[in-house]
Amino acid sequence: MGNKELELGFQKILDGNKGWVDFVKEDKTGRFEQLAKGQNPEILWIGCADSRVPANEITGTKPGEVFVHRNIANMCVHSDMSMLSVLDYAVNVLKVKHIVVAGHYGCGGVAASLSRKQFGIIDNWLCHIKDVYRLHADEIDAIDDNEKKTDRLVELNVKEQVFNLCTTSIVQNAWKNGQDLAVHGMVINIGTGELINLDNTFTSNDALGKVFAFQ
């Protein structure tokens, strides 16, 4: 790609923003003026960085309604200070009511974790997904079709990340303090646009096991 193509690509970004500015200018509801003063979302969305799964479009929500954190394969790693900082702000400052961990079928990160190939620095991140595979290896290995194998690991990975999220000190203390907070595991079908509920919702630490549940 030459400099001309790069310039055209950058100009496309600027032109897109001009269209958005016109849309904001023509809006008569006053919601953008209100948004400029602050935000009050009820949802924290932890999703994949994949360009095909934008939170607002999938949930039919407007700017200001969803607080978003995204990374490769929607991971909730206990030592990830970026995720923990977003989580802390969302729960303790914004007082969100719902946290959604959203995976998606056909996830490249999950597929890569089932491979023995090296991809670069991301291999270290994929080890977290390989750990999920290790917990469910018998079930995953029993699936012959590679696409179905990946999609099942997508589902299992979401459930493990929900569990990881629920066992953070941030979520545990919110529940301990009586805060209304639900954590949900869901999967996106990109082809249909459907957001599939995995029936993996927690509203307290009752089902986490006593070694994980703070007193």
Image (cartoon, rainbow, N blue to C red):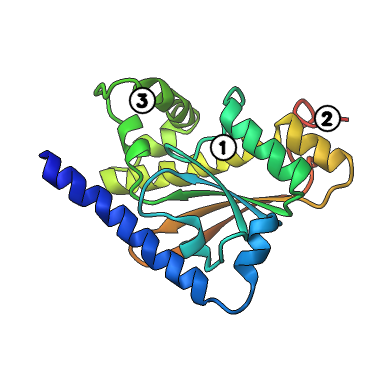
Amino acid under label 3? Ile
Instruction: Check residue 160 in the rendering and tell me which mark sits there, or answer none.
Output: 1
Task: Give the alpha-carbon distance from disc 3 to disc 2, as whole Å.
Answer: 33 Å
Q: Nearer the viewer, mark 3 or mark 2?
A: 3
Q: Nearer the viewer, residue 191 or 95?
A: 95
- In the image: residue 124, left or right of residue 87: left
Quadrant in the picture for the C terminus: top right
Instruction: Check residue 122 in the rendering and tell me which mark sits there, or answer none.
Output: 3
Q: Nearer the viewer, mark 1 or mark 3?
A: 3
Between discs 1 and 2, the one toward the N terminus = 1
Disc 1 crowd rating (10 Å Cα; few below 14, some 14-19, many 20+) is: some
Q: Are marks 3 and 2 in contact (CB under 8 Å)?
A: no
What residue sits 57% from the left and 38% below the top? 161
Residue 21 drawn at (x, y percent): 45, 65
Question: Picture quarter containing residue 83?
Answer: top right
Label 1 secondary element: helix
Label 2 secondary element: loop
Amino acid under label 2? Phe
Q: Which residue is mark 2?
A: 214
Q: Is residue 63 visible?
A: yes
Task: Give the alpha-carbon distance from disc 1 to disc 2, as whole Å.
Answer: 19 Å
Whether residue 139 is situated above or below residue 135 in the rendered picture: below
What residue sits 66% from the left and 38% below the top? 87
